[in-house]
Image (cartoon, rainbow, N blue to C red):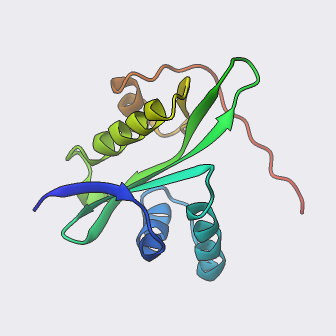
């Protein structure tokens, strides 16, 4: 059975939400709100969401957003999510999704492809470094009221 990568559709939302919860560890307690948020992302021209599908089942997904840079001319893409079902990991699915993302960014003349990864996700760090990404700094976040 062949593995294909394609753009995500609204029909993929339940599978993507399950990956966000199980593979990435972000609980989706409000499924209806999460589905609406993901639907907005799928319909935004600033986002690209890819799914890896085999036999009709979504085994992984990658989401990235297009942005403008302050420090250099041109656009760049930031990978904001990459997840593969646990039982399907180490079969090249993440690499295939990453290759498709890189090709899309190049076709759109992006100057850079970036990704952040949590400090505790050491296997993910090794995965990105294996694919040519360099550690550049730390990412910080602050939860805001409202």
Provide residue 35's location: percent of width, then percent of height.
Answer: 58, 75
Work out whether residue 54 or residue 74 is closer to the camera in this orientation and state it.
74
**Residue drawn at point x = 18 percent, y = 69 percent:** 55
Provide residue 101's location: percent of width, then percent of height.
Answer: 42, 40
Is residue 38 found left or right of 63 in the rendered image?
A: right
- Image: 59 above or below 114: below
Q: Is residue 118 visible?
A: no
Say which quadrant the C terminus sits in. Answer: bottom right
**Residue drawn at point x = 55 percent, y = 63 percent:** 42
Res. 139 image quadrant: top right
Provide residue 96's location: percent of width, then percent of height.
Answer: 28, 43
Provide residue 11's location: percent of width, then percent of height.
Answer: 43, 76
Q: Residue furthest left?
A: 1
Work out whether residue 10 or residue 91 is closer to the camera in this orientation and state it.
10
**Residue drawn at point x = 44 percent, y = 68 percent:** 9
Say which quadrant the N terminus sits in. Answer: bottom left
- Image: 20 above or below 139: below
Q: Is residue 52 visible?
A: yes
Res. 126 image quadrant: top left
């Amino acid at each position: 059975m062949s593995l294909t990568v394609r753009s995500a559709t609204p029909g993929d939302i339940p599978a993507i939400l399950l990956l966000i919860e199980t593979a990435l560890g972000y609980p989706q307690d409000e499924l209806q709100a999460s589905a609406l948020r993901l639907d907005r992302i799928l319909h935004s021209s600033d986002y690209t969401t890819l799914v890896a599908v085999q036999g009709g089942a979504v085994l992984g997904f990658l989401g990235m957003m297009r942005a403008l840079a302050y420090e250099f001319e041109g656009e760049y893409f930031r990978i904001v999510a990459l997840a593969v079902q646990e039982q399907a990991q180490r079969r090249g699915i993440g690499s295939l999704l990453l290759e498709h993302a890189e090709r899309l960014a190049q076709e759109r003349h992006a100057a850079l492809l970036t990704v952040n990864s949590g400090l505790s996700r050491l296997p993910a760090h090794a995965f990105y470094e294996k694919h040519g990404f360099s550690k550049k700094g730390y990412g910080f976040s602050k939860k805001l009221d409202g």
